[in-house]
Image (cartoon, grey):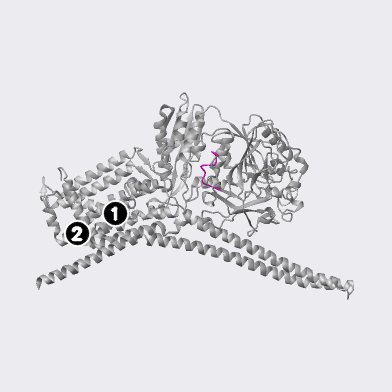
Amino acid sequence: MGGKVNFAIVKALAKRDLRLYFSSPAGYVFITLFIFLSAAAAFWQNRFFLDNLANLDQLNRVFPFLLLMFIPALTMSVWSEERRLGTAELLFTLPATDLEIVLGKYAATLGIYTASLLLSLSHVLVLFFLGSPDLGLMFGNYVGYWLVGAALVPVGMLASLLTMNMTVAFILGALFCGTVIFIDTVVGSFSVDAGRLVAPLSVFSPFGDFSKGVLTFSGLLTFVSGAGFFLYLNTLVVSRRHWPREADGYPMWSHHAVRAVALAVALVAANAVIARATLRLDVTAERLSSVSDETRRLIAELPDDRPVFIQAFLSPVVPEPLVQARSNLIGILEEIDALAGSKVEVLIEDTEPFTDAAVSAREKFFILPRQMRDLSGGRSEIAEVFLGVAFTAGAEQKVIPFFDRGLPTEYEIVRTIRVVAGSERKRVGVVDTMVKIFGGQSLVGDQQMPQWSVVNELRKQYEVVEVNAEFPIPPDIDGLLVALPSSMQTDQMTNVAEYIRQGNPAMLLVDPLPAVNPTLAPSEWVGDGNPFTYPPGSPRPGPRGNVRQWIADLGVAWEPTRIIWDSYNPHPDLSYMPSEVVFLGAGNENPATFNADADVAKDLQELVFLYPGFLGPLNDADPDVEFEPLLRTGVVSGHSGYFTLVQQSFFGPQINPSPVRQQDDNDFVVAARIRSGGGGTASETETTDAAETEPAEDTPATQDPAATDAESSGSPWTTDGPLNLVVIADLDFISEQFFQIREVAPANLNFDNVTFFLNAMDSLLGDDSFIGLRSRRARHRTLERVEAQTAQFVEQRTLEEQQAEEEADQALTDAQSRLDERVAEVQNRTDIDAQAKQIMARNLEEVENRRLAVLSTNIETEKETKIRASLERMETQTRQIQSTIKAFAVLLPPVPVFGLGVWIFVKRQRREREGAVAAHRLRE
């Protein structure tokens, strides 16, 4: 097998086999089947539309399974057909070595597989038709496809060498390829630890990086070494006709078996060593798997005299959901260690329960293992997992106790490094309001409320303290967070306003309907409080300040009784959410959703707000006050009144499941930045186009929050310094559920709520160093064409629902008018006395009211039927779109290849007939 390889012979053999394969219609049938099945795997799944992403994730999950059938189909005739037809002996008489013959066969089969992959690029064309896929990601995916196939082709060839029957060769090929693909499962069935040990040798482990658009040297080496090993086995089996019976007293097959095992051990060892090198190329558009330029800049700015020591306590083996998180964590720590030099020292310790490392993690840093269910090896076990990191610089110490898979690893590490390396941190004051973000006693004092996660998130970067606004705000507070200022009393508002007008930064979270506690809605605070909020005898708070006027004095128009809705929802699996759960994203047809000129918002991709309000500038605002929108809703949106959306009950406010929604032609501002040059006087004007007051019948005068202590706001105040505010019309967007979603990172749910909040706080405090790094994540490349067509159906459904509402209201109005007319006719009669009129009118009203009640029920039922029919129509149209896309995406790509195969078949049949006719003529 030694000696120089003659590539001219290899090339000639490859051309011979390629010509034979592509001159037969059977070859085109297999390629057609491959394209069809891969298209079905990529697009003929409900998950493709539920995820709403323009990528090949669905195909990546099953691609090795697809090759489990396709590779044996390609290779079953490579050797078995040669031996069956007797051409193998002729092949071995060529002036070529066994290795050259094997390489020629391999090159031909790999060429067929490569052609199949090139023809399957139609999948990428389908994605471009539906959206804007990442070309770099597609390139990484197809490189991975090619390498997996290149490694499995010699496995199938080995099976074909062992038999003359193609059917048996196919079965053996599928068995051999399955063993290679599922080697961790096969070995794990005997020993779980051994299965975990060989897991990196399986196809799925290295292919996972390529499916994410990352070309790794370790993955490349795994596939190349696997292909080389099985080519060696092919050459051994081909050359067995030259073997002597025995050598040195041992059978010759035992010599070669030992050599093969030694080669396998050497390759495994080489892969294990080289896998420690972090040689990887991120080919995706966002370069998310490589250290960012922001990280390099921040690391370069670290002081030389304050080195940071990082200790990572990581379990050597983690459950499958955390494998990627652990790998990313190790990779980033090693890259930072190499970048920072002496500024950062990194120590990674393999940590298992009841070891010295586990004791050190617990006693020094209070890093404890987290119990997680491990389903690897076909068993369900509870594993104790360590994924904690401690950062130390001098006396300063910070700990991240566990890296959930949803945490942005690079950002968390770099931020913590900078925090411990810095000497001073800014102080953020959180005003104690009825929301109790800092935790404490509940409103009625009967239970302890936990601290919100947002406080812990701020503490990772700032010194966070609770502020009692009943007293003047301390001057050493660098920035203020005011959650739900509508729940503050007049003196608290005055103290906060005094702090703001001195030019200090503040973030205001206003909310017309806090989902965390609807009883805290501004419309519920009437006089001395809502009677349903407190048990009898419990103390009630004092009168609330006039929050509408207070906000207006800051240059912002906000109507506390208006709640916005938006029909845009990019998550079909969350379609049951009401429209008042507002999704902001690029697919809502509003290019101004995220302010491209604001660093805090320009790189955001998707946010969710729960029952938010909307903001606007005052019509007569001071010209020095700048109102800069940061976030806007989509074009198919509107607003509803609080008392239309919320129904009062004995247990407090309840959400109306079927509120009346009126579409507005304008979009709505959900968050804004307010700045001024200082010394300006805020206008006390409250009327604004962006925040019109609600109709009188929707907001009873007795429940108008503006009427509550209206005189308490006082006159407009002047600012002694420049205004520096961020106002967000929702409190719930930083509630606990969004921090949990951020940590767990469920499929297709990656919201930027926490990112936007932290960006806004950093910008207020004048620290923009983390904004770019924090906002860095994969672009949410959606199925834009599907979204656009679905949006049309949603808009049509909204119009039909509005029409049904209007028709129902008109029918009820007409019925009431008829009743009034009949009563008026009785009252206008002159042939009866007044008492008779009264009796007749009362009887008539009772009869007509019963009829009206029945008619009202029928009208309401008819309205609900029309709304339901409109919804069903929209769902049917959406399913038709999806079915059409599935059909075209799956059925069209194989057609050209199948047509070419039919043409080859017809051409071959014609040549055979012509040859038969010519032979018949010669015989005659």
Residue at horizontal 21 percent and vertical 58 percent from the top:
20
Q: Position of residue 532 (x, y in %)?
A: 72, 52
SS at mark 2 in the image: helix
Give percent across and percent down for residue 643: 69, 55
Above or below, 228 against 420 in this view is below
Q: Residue at x 23, y 65 (%)?
A: 907
Left or right of 227? Residue 505 is right
**Residue 366 appears in view:** no
Judge by depth and name the residue closer to the eye, 19 or 204.
19
How many labels sit on residues? 2
Write the start and end of the magenta stretch as one range.
Answer: 598-607
Residue projecting furthest to the top: 305
> Horizontal and vertical percent for residue 423?
53, 27
For the C terminus, give its image quadrant. Answer: bottom left
- Image spot of residue 52 (x, y percent): 47, 54
Q: Residues within 10 Å of mark 2 (few under 14, many from 20)?
A: many
The label shown at residue 391 is: none
Above or below 726: residue 119: below
Task: Please name which of the two marks, 1 or 2, marks the residue nearer to the observer.
Answer: 1
Q: Quadrant of residue 510?
A: top right
Q: Identify the residue at horizontal 25%, vertical 55% (top origin).
A: 156
The numbered dot on residue 115 is: 1
Residue type, mark 2 in image: Ser
The reply to whether residue 419 is visible in this rendering is yes
- Tell me the amino acid under the disc marked 1: Ala
> Which one is nearer the viewer's eye here, 623 or 58?
623
Judged by its main secondary structure, the magenta piece is loop
Q: Is residue 921 left or right of residue 658?
A: left
Lower sequence index among marks 1 and 2: 2
Residue beneath label 2, please?
A: 80
